[in-house]
Amino acid sequence: MDEKLKSTIDKIVQLSKQNTEFDAELRKRLNTTSSAKSVYDEERIERIEKYLGLDFYVDTKTSNVDYSFIKLPDVRALLISDNREMMRFRYGTRYHEIDFAEFCRYAHFQIEMLLNYYYDIANKSDLDSIKEQIKYYNPTAVGVEKAKSLGAISYSTKLWAFNKEYRIDYNLYENLRKVRNELSHRSVSEDKISIDSYQKYLKEQGLPLNKKGNVSLNWKDKEADKELKELYNSQIKDSEDFKHYKYLIWYYGTPFDDIVNGLNEIASVIRTVLQ
């Protein structure tokens, strides 16, 4: 549909919510045929109003993360823009389908921008000071010393250092990075096979799983539990296969709210530190 027509519909819907007489007349004008079609039209109008109202809400909402503390206007505007785009992929508005991977991608953009903003402002844009801070909390990081700019230092390096300094939910932010990197080559069928296969392996080892598929760590004092705990700690917990399995069950659990909470967490830490 033409953008001008969509804009007109938006205005009509907004006006109908603000003016009851206009709303009544609009419904009267549309309900011109049989009672059966009248009921259908009314339901159809309500669905359209709900959709457009949600789109209008997303479009006008400042952000579901408080970015008011960001002093640089361009950075603040970009964070809010990425947040709105992220939410469109959650609700399926403005030509978007509900898409968890795209939701994650725009969440990742915000975290990356927040980290850069934090290191830049905290060190008064001095690259040498930025490097010193990152190396202090991430001494084994590669490439920091040779970086010619803050942007040239990898996201993972900055995230690890930030986590060591402030103890954030590192796994959540690392998962978002993985989604961003794998966005163009995900295979749902292969992922499902991997999940089923590894769950079968865990069960064969006697490890209990909860409803989400995570290993239940409620170990008791029984000898059998001690053996399971030892097996888990020595062979399972740090294995690459288990890490990939945990990432997959997280991804297909589509934890939208957890990600929004994670964005608020990192923004809150930065806001507090920079005050």
Image (spheres, rainbow, N blue to C red):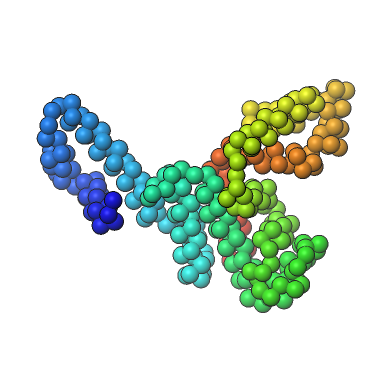
What residue do we see at 63% from left, 31% from top?
212
Residue at image point 31% right, 46% down: 52
- Using the image as rendered, state which of residue 98 and residue 14 is in the foreground: 98
Which quarter shows the C terminus? bottom right
Residue 45 percent across, percent down from the top left = 24, 38
- Numbered-mark total: 0
Please tell me whether residue 214 is drawn above or below residue 78 in the rendered image.
above
Q: Residue at x 56, y 41 (%)?
A: 255
Residue 19: tell me if it is visible: yes
Q: Is residue 133 left or right of residue 77?
A: right
Q: Is residue 11 left or right of residue 251?
A: left
Residue at coordinates 59% horizontally, 38% vertically from top-left? 188
Instruction: Tell me residue 95's x, y (percent).
Output: 38, 49
- Residue 205 percent coordinates (x, y): 80, 26
Task: Indicate the position of residue 19 as horizontal and vertical percent values.
Answer: 19, 47
Question: Is 270 drawn above or below residue 28 in the view shown?
Answer: below
Q: Quadrant of residue 130?
A: bottom right
Q: Is residue 218 visible?
A: no
| Left or right, residue 131 beside residue 34 | right
